[in-house]
Image: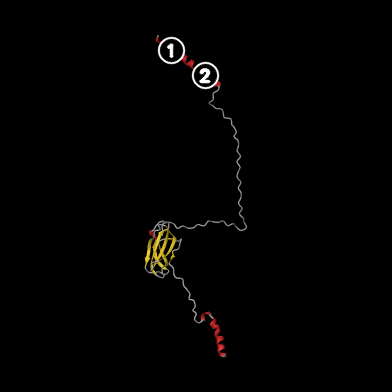
Amino acid sequence: MYHLFHLFFLLLPLLSLPGHRPGLQQDQPTSTPPEVAIVSPSSGDALQGTVPVTGNTAVDGFLRAELTFAYSDDPTNTWFLIFESDQPTSNGELTRWDTTTLTDGDYSLRLVVTLQDNTQLVATLQNLRLRNYTPIETDTPTPTQTPVPGNTLVPTQTSTPTITPIPPTSTALPPNPAQLTSQDVALSLGKGAIGAIAALGIIGLYVAVRNAMRR
């Protein structure tokens, strides 16, 4: 009897452990099922040339997969086929997308996996910038001025000059050299009259001499 009690106390710690309870099963760890996804490229990437597209289509009940693209600003929401397959891909390269046949702009990719029950799983990737024929935009940081420690930059105030108007002063005009005085007019008339009388005298003398010669 003593030996039975002694054996019971030896086995009691083992029976109290969760993993050694008779008739109980441990919980099995659960894994997250794979999802349909486009792994690369990423949203916002600038693409040029032939671009490898990687993703995952290996999901339960897989039937077929297709990869399509669309113009981001297309209001008709029209998608164009790039690749289709009836074989699942587990986080690998789906296809290579030749972007040189398209005009530069912003595009979207869509990966659709159709299951055996005709259910469709969709993964969409937006804002892909095709830049084969135009420069790729680069962000230019705005320069910032860092003051030197110990020196405080204090803005200086620039005074605005005051303009004082100067009143105009009248200045007498110089005499006009073409202006005639009354004396100049009288002198000019006298000279004109003398000249006329002299001319008439010469004409009369010429006529008298001519008549005398005819006689």
Residue at figure coordinates x 41%, y 10% from the top left = 211
Where does label 1 land, which residue? 207
Q: Quadrant of the N terminus?
A: bottom right
Q: Name the amino acid type tagged 1.
A: Val
- Residue 159: x %, y % from top left: 61, 46
Using the image, tell me which numbered label, if any, was put on residue 51. Answer: none
- Residue 170: x %, y % from top left: 59, 32
CA gap between label 2 and label 1 equals 27 Å
- Residue 113: x %, y % from top left: 40, 66
Where does label 2 land, which residue? 189
Q: Nearer the viewer, residue 123 or 167?
A: 123
Q: Quadrant of residue 153?
A: bottom right
How packed mark 1 is, by other alpha carbons closer than 10 Å (few <14, some 14-19, many 20 or more), is: few
Q: Name the amino acid type tagged 2.
A: Leu
Q: Nearer the viewer, residue 49 or 183?
A: 49
Residue farthest along the top direction in this orientation: 215
